[in-house]
Image (spheres, rainbow, N blue to C red):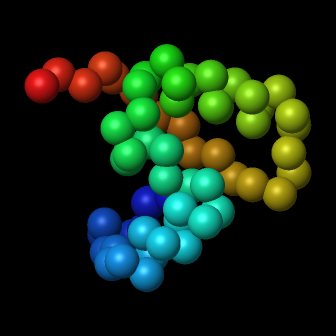
Amino acid sequence: MRPPYANYNDQVRSAAYFRNQSRDSSGTSVTAQQAAYTNVANAHPNSILVLNRETYAMTL
């Protein structure tokens, strides 16, 4: 979940967490993110809108 203009606060973070929408910004590995995406896509949900973007490994 990414709010418009990156406009978020603790309330938005909390709501995203409880809806399990915060994995990509929580430091989850690229492999885990790809697996989560694949699991959702394979379920063929009709209640969500998925926005795809490139995923890169973190470099620290």
Vertical placement of residue 28 versus 45, above or below: above
Residue occupying the far left of the picture: 60
Vertical placement of residue 37 versus 22, above or below: above
Which residue does the image show at 17% across and 22% down from the upper left? 59
* Residue 56 sits in quarter: top left
Vertical placement of residue 16 versus 31, above or below: below
- Tell me: 27 left or right of 39: left
* Residue 31 drawn at (x, y percent): 49, 18
* Residue 30 drawn at (x, y percent): 43, 23
Which residue does the image show at 82% across and 27% down from the upper left? 42
- Tell me: 48 left or right of 36: right
Please count the marks in the image: 0
- Tell me: 9 left or right of 23: left
* Quarter of the image with the C terminus in it: top left
* Residue 36 drawn at (x, y percent): 64, 31
Which residue does the image show at 62% across and 22% down from the upper left? 35
Which residue does the image show at 52% across and 29% down from the upper left? 33
Vertical placement of residue 31 versus 47, above or below: above
47 or 60, which lies in front?
60
